[in-house]
Image (cartoon, helix red, strand yellow):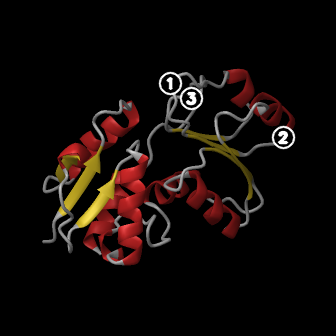
């Protein structure tokens, strides 16, 4: 069995990341967890997963290294251009999207960008935003939104239930929505396990 290492930055607080790490520990017992402050050298041939939030300089350097020399180490899919684990997990829970309007509140290269590209490929109308967009309230009330995916990563970002109550499918990975009818977990660990078995 190849080595599987999960790299994270414990100096940055993030409750979503911490629950993801716990789930990986529970379901993939051979995974090795390393804080980036203790990560010295990449063991080439091992599979790596970078769990954000992460020091951007470190993350970009490692993704560029994998993209250029060691694409087989990229479990997530960012360096190889493959659909990322999180994007694939979200697609599994939202179902068919042809001709639907999907709003994504996240523009990261792990979730928002690959998810938007894949949704467009599948025939969806996609609106991609980040949480600092000043007119989110107007957009959600004046647009017929079928699916909302929110993963702002910010504790202070909240959307009132009045804005989301008419949206059929709501995926909330950052506790952004004050709406009780929402999907708060997606099968990321299952997708991860499938990739490790490939």
Marks 1 and 3 in Cβ contact (< 8 Å): no
Q: Which of marks 2 and 1 is nearer the N terminus?
A: 2
Q: Distance between the residues labelled 1 and 3?
A: 8 Å
CB contact under 8 Å: marks 2 and 1? no
Disc number lying in front (1 or 3): 1
**Image mark for residue 176:** 3
Q: Is mark 1 on a helix, strand or loop?
A: loop
Residue 76 seen by the camera: no
Task: Locate residue 106, reporting x and y percent.
Answer: 59, 44
Q: What is the CA distance from the residue labelled 2 to the residue labelled 1?
A: 25 Å
Kindly report the distance in space between the C-alpha atoms of the residues bearing marks 2 and 3: 19 Å
Which residue matches tag 2?
143
Residue under label 1: 155
Query: For this view, does 47 lie left or right of residue 83?
Result: left
Circle 3 packing at 10 Å, graded few (<14), some (14-19), many (20+), is many
Local secondary structure at mark 3: loop
Marks 2 and 1: which is nearer the front? 1
Q: Earlier in the sequence, mark 2 or mark 3?
A: 2
- Tell me the quarter of the picture where residue 22 sits: top left
In what quadrant of the picture does the C terminus appear? bottom left
Asked whether residue 14 is in view, the answer is: yes
Q: Which x, y percent locates residue 104?
A: 65, 46
Residue at the image point whose x is 38% and y is 44% from the top: 54
Neighbourhood count class around disc 2 (C-alpha, 10 Å): few under 14, some 14–19, many 20 upward: few
């Amino acid at each position: 069995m190849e080595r599987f290492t999960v790299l994270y930055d414990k100096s940055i607080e993030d409750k979503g990341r911490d629950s993801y790490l716990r789930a990986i520990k529970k379901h993939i017992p051979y995974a090795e967890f390393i804080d980036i402050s203790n990560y010295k050298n990449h063991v080439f041939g091992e599979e790596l997963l970078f769990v954000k939030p992460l020091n951007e300089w470190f993350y970009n350097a490692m993704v560029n290294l994998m993209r250029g020399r060691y694409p087989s180490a990229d479990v997530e899919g960012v360096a190889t251009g493959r659909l990322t684990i999180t994007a694939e997990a979200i697609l599994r829970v939202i179902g068919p999207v042809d001709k639907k309007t999907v709003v994504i509140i996240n523009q990261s290269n792990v979730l928002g960008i690959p998810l938007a590209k894949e949704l467009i490929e599948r025939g969806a109308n996609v609106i991609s935003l980040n949480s600092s967009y000043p007119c989110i309230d107007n957009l959600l009330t004046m647009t017929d939104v079928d699916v909302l995916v929110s993963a702002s990563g910010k504790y202070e970002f909240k959307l009132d239930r009045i804005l989301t109550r008419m949206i059929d499918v709501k995926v909330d990975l950052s506790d952004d929505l004050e709406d009780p009818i929402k999907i708060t977990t997606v099968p990321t660990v299952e997708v991860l396990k499938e990739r490790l078995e490939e």
